[in-house]
Amino acid sequence: MKVITSIQEMQQYMKSLKLEGKTIGFVPTMGYLHEGHLTLINKARSENDVLAVSIFVNPLQFGPNEDFDSYPRDFESDRKLAENNGVDVLFHPSTEEMYPTKMSLTAVVHSRINVLCGRQRNGHFDGVATVLVKLFNIVQPDRAYFGLKDAQQVAVVDGLITDFNFPITLVPVAIVREEDGLAKSSRNVNLTPQERLESTKLYESLQMAKREIEKGQRNPKVIEELIKKHITGHTSGVIDYVEMYRYPELDELSELKGRIIIALAVKFTKARLIDNITFDV
Ligand code: PAF
């Protein structure tokens, strides 16, 4: 596995691989790799000649009160995990390499952001889009892999790739779940044993909603209420939101038709859990 820290070297190396006719899969990350990343890495590994992974904690996507400085970092462990999972090129630039001077131009995301978690994260997706424009230009991948756990990020990347005509196929990767349905997350360890038992109700409520839609229920408000009732009735969690939109546009649903997302966020004592399902009606 090659570890590259220089943008110029990365760009030249990726260009040479492309000239050899190799297909390039790319998994952008902020490091501290976990099972979710490894799922993306394994999928990308199986679909491309060359697998590139980036590790860069992007300051632009953190708000003033968010945890950029304390964001967990462990490059040695990431390097080993990447190597053991078949990564060919690990791109690990410094902040100074990526942002040597204040950017004179950055991306501004106009839609798909003022809903779900994005509503509380002003400017977050502008920072994500800006760093992805840079990373896509540096890595020049054929396919880019993103987890559907953050379905809003997938929607924003879909807009970015379409609007800016990147010759890249976006590959959304399904949420990885525990056997009892709970979406895997590093935050799950912060649940109390009782909350861990209750947490299965989140996915259960989403599946219940899907079944109701399949049976013919077409009123989004009725579906949202059903989910809320299931969660408040069976867990001690406090609902942050339960929302349904057209996907990936994240527009209001005037009618329940086409591809949709049902997403929720629930706060437990020391963990805020998110989950979603996307499907066609
Ligand atoms: O999902 C992430 O880890 C980040 O938002 C990403 C896509 C690597 C951009 O910094």
Image: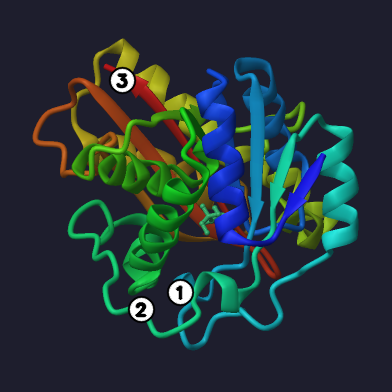
Q: Quadrant of residue 259?
A: top left
Residue 256: percent from left, percent from top: 18, 26
Could you tell which of marks 2 and 3 lies nearer the N-terminus? 2
Q: Nearer the viewer, residue 277 or 85?
A: 85
Q: Amino acid at mark 1?
A: Leu
- Whether label 3 lies within 8 Å of ligand 1 gets the answer no
As drawn, which residue projects farthest toward the left?
Answer: 254
Position of 37 with respect to 240 (left or right) is: right
Whether residue 40 appears in this view of the structure is no
Cα separation between marks 3 and 1: 39 Å
Q: Nearer the viewer, residue 43 or 3?
A: 3
Q: Identify the residue position indicated by label 3 in the image.
A: 213
Cα separation between marks 2 and 3: 46 Å
Q: Nearer the viewer, residue 84 or 192?
A: 84
Q: Identify the residue position indicated by label 1 in the image.
A: 60
Residue 190: percent from left, percent from top: 78, 62
Cα separation between marks 2 and 1: 10 Å
Q: Tell which tag, 2 or 1, sits nearer the viewer.
A: 2
Q: Quadrant of residue 241?
A: bottom left
Label 2 residue SS: loop
Whether residue 125 appears in this view of the structure is yes
Mark 3 surroundings: few (<14), some (14-19) or many (≥20) residues within 10 A? some
Q: Amino acid at mark 3?
A: Ile
Query: Where is the C terminus found, in terms of image quarters?
Result: top left
Label 1 residue SS: helix
